[in-house]
Image (cartoon, rainbow, N blue to C red):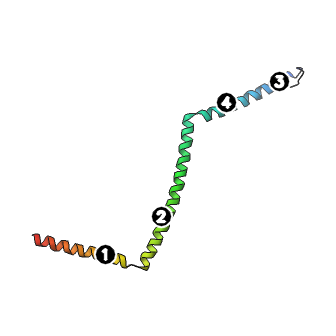
Amino acid sequence: MTGNGTGDVAALREEIRRTRVELGETMELLAARADPKALVRHSAEAAKARMRGRAAQRARLVRAQAYEKGEAVGRNPLPWAAIAAGALVTAVVLVIVRGRRR
């Protein structure tokens, strides 16, 4: 387009067409940014992604801790043996007490 107003009509029409296309694209972008459903959907997807990341990180930590505890039990099974013995004694006492009630 020329500044003196003597521009080519076809070039002017083409420039108008391009401007309309650009304006339409800009309006679509603005409408997408102002769409409440799209904003909520995007926010929810971002929150899900964050929670999945945190859950995966927590799961790795728990697995590592469980592995460490398993290693500790393997090295020192005495506490578990004491718990098992206590459970056995409790069961025997319950059987004796129930037997006397009959």
**Neighbour class for label 1 at 10 Å: few (<14), some, many (≥20)?**
few
Q: Are marks 4 and 1 in contact (CB under 8 Å)?
A: no
The label number, if any, that marks residue 27 in the structure image: 4
- The residue that appears at 51% across and 63% down in the rendered structure is 60
Q: Is residue 47 above or below residue 94?
A: above
Q: Which mark is in front, 3 or 1?
A: 1
Q: Which mark is in front, 3 or 4?
A: 4
Marks 3 and 1 sit apart, C-alpha to C-alpha, by 92 Å
Relative to 60, 5 lies left or right = right
The label number, if any, that marks residue 62 in the structure image: 2
Q: What amino acid does circle 3 point to?
A: Leu
Marks 3 and 4 sit apart, C-alpha to C-alpha, by 22 Å
- The residue that appears at 69% across and 32% down in the rendered structure is 26
The label number, if any, that marks residue 2 in the structure image: none
The label number, if any, that marks residue 12 in the structure image: 3
**Label 2 vs 4, first from the N-terminus:** 4
Position of the C terminus by quadrant: bottom left
**Which residue bears the numbered disc 1?**
84
Marks 2 and 4 sit apart, C-alpha to C-alpha, by 49 Å
Relative to 86, 36 lies left or right = right
Q: Secondary structure at mark 1?
A: helix
**Label 2 vs 1, first from the N-terminus:** 2
Residue 27 screen position, x and y as percent: 67, 30
Q: Secondary structure at mark 2?
A: helix
**Label 3 vs 2, first from the N-terminus:** 3
Residue projecting furthest to the left: 102
